[in-house]
Amino acid sequence: MVRNTWLLVAILACGPSAELRRARTARYQTERAVVLAAVGEVMAAHYPGVALTPMPFEASYFISGWWWVDGEQPISPDRLFARDPPVGSFIRMHVAVSAASPFAVDVFAEVERYEHGWVTPMTYSPGSAEKQMRKRPAWVQDRIDDLDVAIDRALRKYAPMR
């Protein structure tokens, strides 16, 4: 019995939850305006005080402002790129909404780290280990996953069950 319990715990600990898997692969059957409004609302709720910029591409694209992770507050580009910015990690979330229905939503992040005495921030890039400039901290994927699941919860009624 104990062995079976540990096996179940090990299986559950591996890989993303069912809700996260669903959020990553969901496609939404509704009006484009509904999807864009939900994405904007969720991003504003997760990153209050940041500016959302819909991009003028065929697929709609939102970018949050920079967020100072260590201070848990938004930070203006003027302050972030000043001569002596605050020390810590900074994140900017990106969300792309596909051009055609059923709409797909893709979430990713841009992350930088600054320490006293550094001339420029260190950029963390996503991708395989050999292509990365620096390995991204684990909390970055947690923030991406949280936003992905929150957007799916807001739009779930428009996603057909599989």
Image: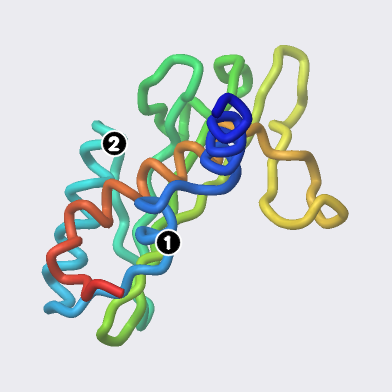
One can see residue 3 in this view: yes
- Displayed quadrant of residue 160: bottom left
Query: Is 114 situated above or below 161?
Result: above
For the C terminus, which image quadrant?
bottom left
136 relative to 64 in the view: left or right:
right
| Residue tagged 2 | 46
Which element type, helix, strand or loop, lies under badge 1? helix
Query: Is 57 situated above or below 47?
Result: below
Residue for point 78% across, 40% down = 134
What residue occupies the far right of the structure in this picture? 130
In the depicted view, which residue is nearer to us: 51 or 100?
100
In the depicted view, which residue is nearer to us: 124 or 22?
22
Give the amino acid type for the residue marked by disc 2 in the picture: His
One can see residue 56 in this view: no
95 relative to 138 in the view: left or right:
left
**Crowd around label 2: few <14 · some 14–19 · many ≥20 (10 Å):** some
> Residue 43: x, y in percent?
28, 45
- Whole-number angstrom distance, CA of label 2 to CA of label 1: 18 Å
> Residue 11: x, y in percent?
58, 43
- Displayed quadrant of residue 123: top right
- Displayed quadrant of residue 155: bottom left
| Residue tagged 1 | 24
Query: Is 33 situated above or below 83?
Result: below
**Crowd around label 1: few <14 · some 14–19 · many ≥20 (10 Å):** some
- Display colour scheme: rainbow
Q: Which mark is residue 4?
A: none
Observer-side mark, 2 or 1, equals: 1
143 relative to 1 in the view: left or right:
left
Residue for point 41% across, 68% down = 25
> Residue 82: x, y in percent?
56, 26
